Image: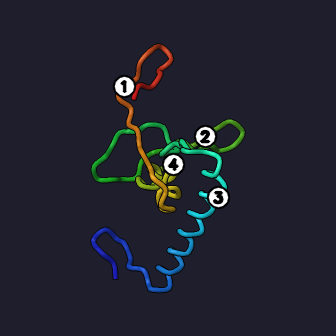
Amino acid sequence: DTDPLGLTALTTSQLATAERVRDETRQYIEQTILQDFDAWIVPVSGALAFKHNLNHDSIPVQIDNGGGTSIEEKVNYWKATISYCTPISVAGSPVVTLSPIEWCGENQNLAV
């Protein structure tokens, strides 16, 4: 069955697999990445800042094409905006997102 958002319900087997992968990911993060650190700071998105759109339409993202060139490609809104923090969040680790308050200074330093 598909809901209005286009999501499909998971079977019991799929849910069990997802929970196992989540637990393995959490264990890996705790034993490797967070073992020596109290926090891990990562970007939320691999894309430059873009205008928010309430409809969550696909957004244009510059993608490295190799050799120092890039191409612009439309990417799913959620994939472009939260793909870097999703594995950490799904694994059950706390996630804090800082939003920029303003750009300041000649070098476009970020104030939060």
Few, some or many C-alpha atoms within 10 Å of disc 4 (few <14, some 14-19, many ≥20)? few
Q: In terms of depth relative to the viewer, which is nearer, 44 or 38?
A: 38
Residue at the extreme right of the image, as rendered: 67
**Residue bearing the label numbered 1:** 102
**Residue bearing the label numbered 2:** 70
**Residue bearing the label numbered 4:** 73
Give the distance between the C-alpha atoms of the residues marked 1 and 3, in whole angstroms.
36 Å
Displayed quadrant of residue 69: top right
Give the distance between the C-alpha atoms of the residues marked 2 and 1, in whole angstroms.
28 Å
What amino acid is labelled 2 in the image? Ser
Q: Is residue 30 above or below residue 81?
A: below
**Sequence order check: which comes first, mark 2 or mark 3?**
3
What amino acid is labelled 3 in the image? Gln
**Residue bearing the label numbered 3:** 31
Judge left or right: residue 60 versus residue 51: right
Give the distance between the C-alpha atoms of the residues marked 4 and 3, in whole angstroms.
36 Å
**Sequence order check: which comes first, mark 4 or mark 1?**
4
Look at the image and tell me in which quarter the N terminus lies: bottom left
Residue at 56% in and 71% down = 21
What amino acid is labelled 4 in the image? Glu
Q: Which mark is residue 47?
A: none
Q: Position of residue 64 (x, y in %)?
A: 62, 43
Q: Position of residue 38 (x, y in %)?
A: 56, 45
Q: Is residue 70 above or below residue 13?
A: above
Q: Is residue 60 above or below residue 2?
A: above
Q: Secondary structure at mark 2?
A: strand
Q: Position of residue 82 (x, y in %)?
A: 45, 51
